[in-house]
Image (cartoon, rainbow, N blue to C red):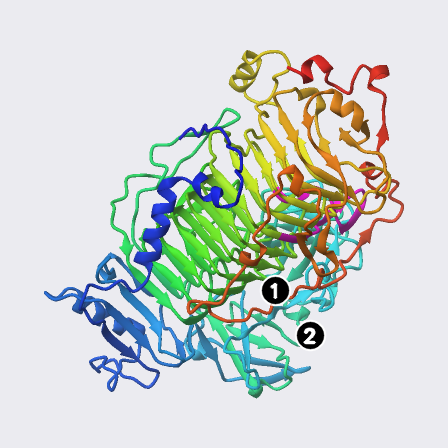
Amino acid sequence: MTYKKDIPALGNDWKGVEKMMNRRFVVLTAILAFAGGAVWAEGSVPNRIHVAVDGHDGNPGTETQPVATLHKAKELARERQASDQPSPLEVVVGGGVYYLEKPLILSPEDSGSFIYPITYRAADNEEVVLRGGRVVSGWEKWKDGIYKTNLKEQGLGRLRFHQLFYKSATSKKATAKRQVLARHPNRDPKHPRTGGYLYTPEQAKEGCRQLLYTEGDIPWGDWGDVSQAEIVSPYGGWYFAITPVWNVNREENTVGFRPIRKPIEKMNRFFVQNVLDALDAPGEWFLDYKKGDLYFYPPAGQIEAGQVIVPVMDHVIELKGTIPYPHKGLSITYQGQLEDCPRSDVPMAPVSFITLKGFTIECAWQDAIRMTGARHCRVVNCRITNAGNVGVNIGGITSAYEEVGTPRVKEATGYATVGAGAGGQSLWSNDPGKSCQVVGCDIWETGCEGIVLLGSDNLAENNHIHDIGLYAKDCPGINLLGERNVARKNTIHDLPRCAIFFKGMENVMEFNDIHNVVLETKDMGAIRSVHRNRYLGGDIIRFNRIFDVPGYGFMAGQLRPDTFMTYGVYLDDYTSNVKVQGNIIVNAGRSGIMVHGGNNVLFENNIVYNPMGFPSEFSPIAPKSEAAKAKARARGPGEKTIFRNNITRNNIMVSSMKGATIPYRFARPEFWGRRKAYFSNNLFYNLQKPDAPMGVVLADKKALSWEQWLDFGMEDGSVFGDPGFVDINNRRFELKEDSPAWALGFKAIPVDEIGCYPSPERASWPLKPNLKRFREKPVVKTISGDPRPASRVWFNVEFIDVSKTGGIGWSEEKAKE
């Protein structure tokens, strides 16, 4: 699994980029494009089974005598494929809303083949909605605009759910709208992401099972039954928990709860939910688990003005096969700690060659579409929303922590993974997918990720993903876990955390249009990896447009929009052997790119414009295990980390610091040496003060002048000058013909190829993403009397004379090794 390959030059034109790709990946992409569609044997005619809302399951499934359910259609399809004369088969579903009584589960016996694929699709030009829920009726007025019904009387008495949806009779949208579980404080419509919270004044002694609140913030004395109460907290900068309340001490102002993985700290935000007496605003609801009573305050005022829909199943559609894990027999160590690997003894029994096309799918406890052990399966042209976990979950992952995600009705299944298949988190992983695709879908309002690709050779292309991560703030729009997975030409915006996360080998992220991400957390990038293994690699991040990555979190006594550790591209924790080429990164919270401990990273031909900190940052990490320390010592003097051979060249870096032009920040300078990094042919500019002195920052508070930096011999051919963008006011970052960047070898970025594109396989066109830089002005909270400053020390760097100090942690001799 070791990946060691020299990083070649970009070449004279962008056509040369394709030649750098792994030849096997190019071939597989072509196969996917061929096999994923309706590839039928010559002369064969697709066999069709028809479904209609007014059909009957006793019918034969013809166009004039359709069946009523997808489950009956599946039975007929299996019978026909088992005959002596199999053929391409389509299950054609007529327009209307279908309330599924149970998940549609497709197993290996329901598979198609390369010659005879099976397609489940919406009828041409008709809207088909598949709902994993039930309409609740029997409403009566209760009090103060709130209505009440009993689920036991409707055969739904055993239901437990944390989601409820309302479909207004006047709404022209096919999908229902998610409502709010009764909470305190109420949701803040002006600040839906950063408002509506309480704040912990101090950390409790047992922060993993208890929090402190300010007296008077929570009206415990005014509430009756709080046996179902829960604490909801996006805490610690990026963690998230929904955890039941165990006890309340009103004298000490503490709330005890089921333990979570990390402590809730001072100034962390939280609210209380699932309390009947907190139901006081339109759109709120509450379910009494013991009595089965459901309460709802309809936003339209009258319950008759719409439908109330509740989920009744884990997943709406599930493709369920088995595939041995792609990392079979692999053991991963991170700083000397052995990580568990999934089992590899499952049979090769995939569900394969099935396409789901043209549906609107909503209302599930967990995933809208879940695939485990799937090969050559596709989800195309679908609109997916209102799922508690993932929109399309290829590989069947979920968090290993019970408090993350919507509270589970059924126990999570799978294999605990942390290493090559877990993306830096602890996950339950099931059988991976191989050569599967998610193409042309609109995905929004999911509890966790929009799309997960766990396995190898999977593709997410031309999808529009936004407003996900409702029940887990540490999740991406697209999660690539495994080998040779691709995220291409997607439009991703308005997320609490990153747009794309990747972990594994030879994954590709290209031509994605990303904006307004990392809106509720910190220590993140628009595109991020946490390999924790320097032998993984071969990943490519290229031609992505990344706008507005602010970050939000706590520091220096304040909860505020936060530049702290927020980047355009974040290669975290030893992520190595990655090419970052041709990206446009604008308004990153702190830096355009952060290389944190990795090696063999190529940062080439990118535009970094107006970061709140520095255009680029580099931070070695000291080895932790004795074996890693020994290897570092064996490489010679000054070699205390694996951080080495990182190349930064042919980039345009435009900053806006008033005091100085600082293109680079170097952390832990005591670990630096000549072999650590190389810089060449970069173009620098300062928006605020073009004549400001240039330098590089070392360990935040100090900086070297540009002349002193050049004396170390790590930079060659870079210049200062106005890059000459076409129209920055309208966010056009193409270069004018007289730009000085051309002479340095900069190559034009194909901006017209970025993002979603019109296609018969697109769910909607044109897209209407909200391009406003920030939808809301983030809530800023401070602790009165906190003496710590809120300003950032690196905005006021101090130049030093290294000749008098003996250097800033490394010597000229070490730097020139």
Query: Do we see residue 17 in this rendering?
Result: yes
Q: Is residue 415 above or below residue 467?
A: above
Q: Position of residue 219 (x, y in %)?
A: 74, 63
At horizontal 70% and vertical 12% (from top left) the residue drawn is 813
Q: Which residue is mark 2?
A: 281
- Span colored in magenta: 546-569
Residue drawn at x 73%, y 49% is: 724
Q: Nearer the viewer, residue 731 or 170?
A: 731
Quadrant in the picture for residue 440: bottom left
Question: Disc 1 on helix, strand or loop?
Answer: loop
Q: Is residue 560 magenta?
A: yes
**Which of these two is toward me, 560 or 568?**
568
Q: Is residue 797 above or below residue 450?
A: above
- Check disc 2 and report its element: helix, strand or loop: loop
Label 2 crowd bin: few (<14), some (14–19), many (20+), radius 10 Å: some
- The amino acid sitting under disc 1 is Asn
Q: How far separated are the C-alphas under marks 1 and 2?
A: 14 Å
Q: Residue at x 56, y 58 (%)?
A: 752
Q: Residue at x 68, y 18 (%)?
A: 815
Magenta highlight: main SS? strand
* Residue 480 percent location from the top left of the image: 47, 47
Query: Residue 88: x percent and y percent?
Result: 22, 67
* Relative side of 217 to 391, left or right: right
Q: Say if the magenta span includes residue 453.
A: no
Query: Mark 2 or mark 1, which is nearer the start of the sequence?
Result: 1
748 in relation to 301, above or below: above
